[in-house]
Every structure is written in C-alpha cells, then in structure tokens.
C-alpha cells in the first residue's frame, strides 16, 4: 500500500457562492433608503428654487455709487440709519388699482421714515418726514444718467418722481446731516399683499373715520384690517385731523408698530408654507440698497435687529411749522428739527424739546 504522503497534494476545488438572496426586510430597508435619498435631493432642489425665487424678487439700487463721496460722515458710534419709503408707484395694473385709478402718473414717496437703531440694537426710533414738507433738493443724477439741478421749496414727496430713490436719500442726508446706511422701499401692492399674507393687522382706531375718497369707514376702537383696508388706513387724509398729511402720520406710525408686532408674534418656523407666503409677499415688491439686495443680506440684517422690541420703538414726527407763503405746505421747524437730527447723528437721547411740532395737523 502506498503512503498517501508520497502522492502529489491535491487542492480542493473552490466552491462557488450561491447568489445572495435578500430578505424582505432588507429589500424594504433599501427601498426606504433610496426613497429618503430621493426626497433629500428633491427637497434640496425645492429649497434652492424657493431661495432663488425670493432672492430674485428683491430689486437693488446702488446708493453708494449714485451719491459718491459727497455725503455726511459716518461716526463710529452712530448706530444704523434706515430710510423707509412707502411708494405710491402706479406701475403695473395692481398698483394702479390700489393707487386710485390710472389718472395719476409716475410715483411719489407717500410715506417716509428715518429709522434709527442705536448701538446695541435693543431699541429704535422712527422719524416721519411729512410728504408736504418743503425742502431744498440737491443736485442729483437721474436713473438715466442725466443731471437734475438743485431746486428750493420743492415738496419732499416729489423728489422720488423727479430723480428716483438715490436722490431721496441725498435729500434726506442734506437736510439732516445724518448718514443713511440702508434704503428700503415697498410699493402699494407689496404692502397690501404682506398684510393679507400674515392674516391681517389689528389696530386701535383713535376716532371714528369716514373717508369718502377711499371708502374707509371705521368706528373708534380695535379693528382687524385686511390688506386693502390697511392701505386705506395709512393713506387716509379726509378721515383724520384737519385733513392734511400731518394728521395721518400718527396712523402710519401706529400701524407700522402693529405690523412689526404681528410679524414678530407669528410662529414662522412652525409653518414653512406660511413663512414662504409672507416672505414672498414681503420681497416681491421690495427695493433696497445694494447692501441689502439679497435674501441672505436681508435676513442677516433682520436677525441683527431681533432684539429690538417694536413695542418700545419711539415714533416722532419731524417738527414742522406751516409755511408762511402756503398754509397747505410745511417747513422744518427750528431749532427743534436741528436738535432732533443732531441727537440721531450722535446716537444720543432725543431731548423732549426736539419732539414738539408747531404744526400738528389736529
């Protein structure tokens, strides 16, 4: 018998693996994984689309380029100053309808406020400039590049129509000596849509209002106003005070505080659909300076002001007196106006004497 150890060694043939059979549980888990991946990718695309839409809504104006270096000095402790305009542009069918029809052409700054946010951003003050204020309009460049010469005794709200937003900023800086850091404008349609998007704004009407021009009829007391009613409320002249622009400024300031409080009180993070609707309404009719003309920049600025409580914001009307030549117009009252602007320039407390206006519109 031969010894097996002398025989050549034989390797056992490799066994072929049987095809893996996935269990039903594995197949389900894999399907879930691919489904989640698809949702993430689709969601990312949706988020990008939503961001792009909101970002594309915002229109920008390069104020710095338009004004150059001929501007007030920016003091190190001057806080932030934002010029807010409510534009009564008749551009577009919706704005024409809200503006009272197509008889009025062009656009004017129907509402103007200089909002000063001191260092620390825990409080703010809003100074309303009456639209009927006579001002000196400085030399300005029109949007088409042509030059507009200086003019005295022009109505403040006509500056926008004459040369656009950069000239309004320049006019405010010349009359106040205050450096404007940012510019924000919203038109009629955007204002209406924003109010409707947040579900209306509740205001405490100080007295009965019966405005035959707008059809606004409100009794004194709290009312929740929709977009159209809100627009009529902040624009009413016949229904309040002496029927002048001065009488409605109090309503505009009151409404702005109520609007900011309403937006801040809503759980926007808890309702993405509602958040997008509000953001879309707020941005689609918005024009800002180039520094805020992106969703990211606008959001960062808004977050930086998150500590400002709308309820503590002080609202002041620029002290004005009736013009001696035309009682339907007003001029800045001195020394009150000068003291007010100085306090804002230096980021200091506004003296009580700077808040008193000889012309009240009452």
Image (cartoon, rainbow, N blue to C red):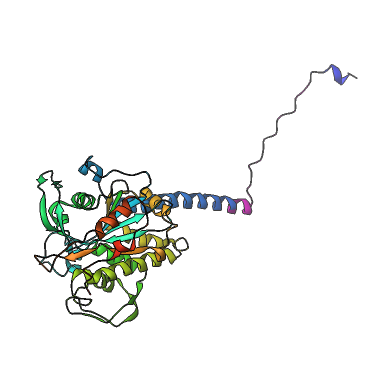
Residue 286 magenta-drawn? no
The image shows residue 78, relative to residue 241, as above or below, that is above
The image shows residue 20, relative to residue 238, as above or below, that is above
Residue that appears at 28% across and 70% down: 250
Residue that appears at 72% across and 29% down: 13
Q: Where is residue 172 in the image (x, y as percent from the top left)?
A: 22, 53
Residue that appears at 23% across and 50% down: 173
Residue 16 magenta-drawn? yes
Q: In the depicted view, which residue is nearer to us: 217 or 72?
A: 72
Q: Where is residue 61 in the image (x, y as percent from the top left)?
A: 24, 48
Q: Quadrant of the N terminus?
A: top right
Q: Is residue 204 left or right of residue 107?
A: right
Q: Where is residue 97 in the image (x, y as percent from the top left)?
A: 18, 68
Total marks placed: 0
Q: In the depicted view, which residue is nearer to us: 139 or 177?
A: 177
Q: In the depicted view, which residue is nearer to us: 56 or 41?
A: 56
Q: Where is residue 291 in the image (x, y as percent from the top left)?
A: 31, 46
- Residue 57 visible in this rendered orientation of the protein: no
Q: In this view, does 179 lie to the left or right of 322?
A: right
Q: What is the magenta segment's predominant secondary structure?
A: loop
Instruction: Name the quadrant containing residue 146.
Output: top left
The magenta segment is: 9-28
């Amino acid at each position: 018998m031969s010894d097996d150890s002398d025989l050549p060694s034989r390797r056992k043939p490799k066994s072929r693996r049987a095809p893996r059979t996935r269990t039903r549980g594995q197949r389900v888990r894999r399907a879930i994984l691919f489904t989640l991946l698809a949702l993430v990718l689709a969601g990312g695309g949706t988020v990008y689309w939503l961001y792009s839409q909101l970002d594309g809504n915002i229109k920008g104006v390069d104020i710095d380029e338009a004004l150059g270096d001929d501007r007030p000095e920016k003091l190190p402790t001057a806080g932030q100053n934002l010029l807010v305009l409510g534009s009564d542009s008749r551009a577009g069918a919706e704005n024409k309808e809200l503006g009272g029809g197509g008889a009025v052409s062009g656009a004017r700054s129907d509402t103007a406020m200089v909002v000063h946010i001191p260092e620390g951003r825990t409080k703010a003050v809003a100074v309303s400039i009456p639209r009927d204020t006579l001002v000196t309009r400085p030399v300005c460049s029109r949007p088409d590049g042509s030059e507009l010469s200086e003019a005295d005794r022009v109505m403040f709200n006509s500056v926008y129509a004459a040369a656009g937003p950069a000239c309004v900023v320049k006019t405010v800086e010349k009359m106040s000596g205050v450096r404007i850091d940012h510019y924000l404008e919203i038109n009629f349609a955007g204002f209406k849509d924003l109010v409707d998007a947040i579900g209306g704004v509740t205001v405490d009407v100080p007295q009965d209002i019966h405005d035959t021009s707008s059809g606004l009829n409100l009794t004194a007391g709290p009312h929740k106003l929709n977009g159209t009613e809100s627009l009529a409320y902040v624009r009413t002249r016949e229904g309040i005070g002496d029927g002048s622009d001065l009488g409605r400024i109090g309503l505009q300031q009151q409404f702005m505080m109520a609007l900011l409080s309403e937006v801040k009180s809503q759980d926007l993070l808890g309702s993405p659909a509602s958040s997008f609707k509000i953001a879309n309404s707020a941005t689609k009719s918005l024009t800002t300076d180039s520094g805020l003309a992106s969703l990211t920049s606008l959001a960062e600025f808004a977050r930086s002001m998150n500590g400002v409580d709308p309820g503590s914001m002080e609202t002041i009307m620029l002290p004005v007196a009736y013009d001696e030549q035309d009682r339907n117009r007003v001029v800045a009252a001195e020394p009150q106006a000068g003291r007010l602007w100085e306090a804002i320039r230096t980021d200091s407390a506004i003296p009580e004497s700077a808040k008193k206006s000889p012309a009240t519109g009452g």
